[in-house]
Image: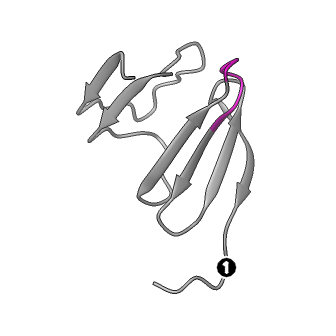
Amino acid sequence: MCWLSIVGAYLQGVELQDATLAGALMRESVFTETFDAIWSVAISRSGQYWAAGSKRGEVRIWEAGGKTLHLACIRRGMES
């Protein structure tokens, strides 16, 4: 279920640590840091951890509501 649709938001340099985007549909938006075409996003129920998975198999997990990068995993040896 989507409660909020966000299209064309320019969020570069914006700190969103106090915001929750749980249930939001985001399209064509700009963030401070990107790493590839994002195919999936998940936010923990508490909002403490955010995760994003890329087309190339990279996964990043942020802590503190998306403020601090906690873990980055890169899948090696994938065929395009």
- The reply to whether the magenta stretch includes residue 77 is no
Q: Position of residue 68 (x, y in %)?
A: 70, 35
Q: Which residues are magenta?
A: 45-50
Seen at 31% across and 38% down, the residue is 29
Amino acid type, mark 1: Arg
Number of numbered discs present? Answer: 1
Q: Residues within 10 Å of mark 1 (few under 14, many from 20)?
A: few
Q: Position of residue 19 (x, y in %)?
A: 52, 15
Position of residue 80 in the picture relative to residue 44 (left or right) = left
Question: Which quarter of the picture shows residue 43?
Answer: top right
Position of residue 5 in the picture relative to residue 13 (left or right) = left
Seen at 67% across and 79% down, the residue is 76
Identity of the residue furthest to the front in this view: 1
Q: Quadrant of the N terminus?
A: top left
Q: Name the secondary structure under disc 1.
A: loop
Q: Identify the colour scheme used.
A: one colour
Residues 74 and 41: in front is 41
Question: Which quarter of the picture shows residue 61?
Answer: top right
2 is higher (above) or lower (below) than 59: above
Q: Quadrant of the C terminus?
A: bottom left
For label 1, the residue is 76
58 is higher (above) or lower (below) than 71: below
Residues 67 and 58: in front is 58
**Magenta-highlighted stretch: main secondary structure?**
loop
Question: Which quarter of the picture shows residue 67?
Answer: top right
Q: Position of residue 59 (x, y in %)?
A: 63, 55
Q: Position of residue 2 (x, y in %)?
A: 36, 22
Identity of the residue furthest to the left in this view: 8
Seen at 53% across and 24% down, the residue is 15
26 is higher (above) or lower (below) than 22: below
Seen at 42% across and 39% down, the residue is 31
